[in-house]
Image (spheres, rainbow, N blue to C red):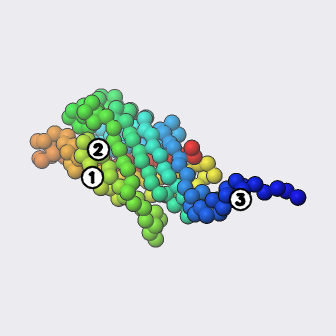
Amino acid sequence: MTKVLPGMIILVGLCASMPLNAYADATYAFSCHESSIKGAVAYSVIGMYRSIFRECSGKIVYDSLKSQVKSVEISIITTSIESSCKWCDNIIKSKQVLNAAAYPVITFKSDNFENKEDGPWASGVFDLHGITKNLRFPFDLKEQNDNTLSLTGTWDLRRKDFNIIWNRWLDYGGILVGDYITVDWQVKAHKI
């Protein structure tokens, strides 16, 4: 006959009393080594300025029982922006546009998720160029396996909302740079 120790009874009782979601939430981490964050804005000199951020990091908390994202945090290094047009990159990083020296990190931190008919939506606080705004957007989620998540989505940002003024005279009297920046992102995150 197997002897049951008092400590074993307490341990079994504790496990049985824990809620199921204590086992469901897991944290996943990602970086721009496997993920991509790409931006595009109309620029009449070259047609379209298309860029990619080479450095980013973030975390996702995911409930596997409900197949639902609980929270997302992301940091993007402003100076890591690159394109095929190096002189454009220098302008974008300068005080004239993103001012990467003063604002080295772009961040997003979620505060709510909701499931709608067209899929999941996220909302949260987005900080760009020293200005914080609420951002709400749809995204796609795929659970690739027990240890990997894939999220994709798009942000449409009005640059003037973040005080990104290309040139005051042109912004009020001509069209050189588009008002909207489109950011397409694809995140591949691994359980930690």
Q: Is disc 1 placed on a helix, strand or loop?
A: strand
176 horizontally vs 147: left or right: left
Write the residue at 67% across / 56% down.
Answer: 11
How crowded pointer 2 is (Cα within 10 Å; few <14, some 14-19, many 20+) is rated as: many
How crowded pointer 1 is (Cα within 10 Å; few <14, some 14-19, many 20+) is rated as: few
Q: Closer to the N terminus: mark 2 or mark 1?
A: 2
- Measured from the top left, where is residue 143 in percent x and y? 58, 55
Write the residue at 42% across / 47% down.
Answer: 73
For disc 2, the marked residue is 128
117 horizontally vs 14: left or right: left
Q: Amino acid at mark 3?
A: Ile
For disc 1, the marked residue is 133
Q: Closer to the N terminus: mark 1 or mark 3?
A: 3
| Numbered label attached to residue 113 | none
Give the alpha-carbon distance from disc 1 to disc 3, as whole Å: 52 Å
| Numbered label attached to residue 9 | 3
Whether label 2 touches label 1, CB < 8 Å: yes
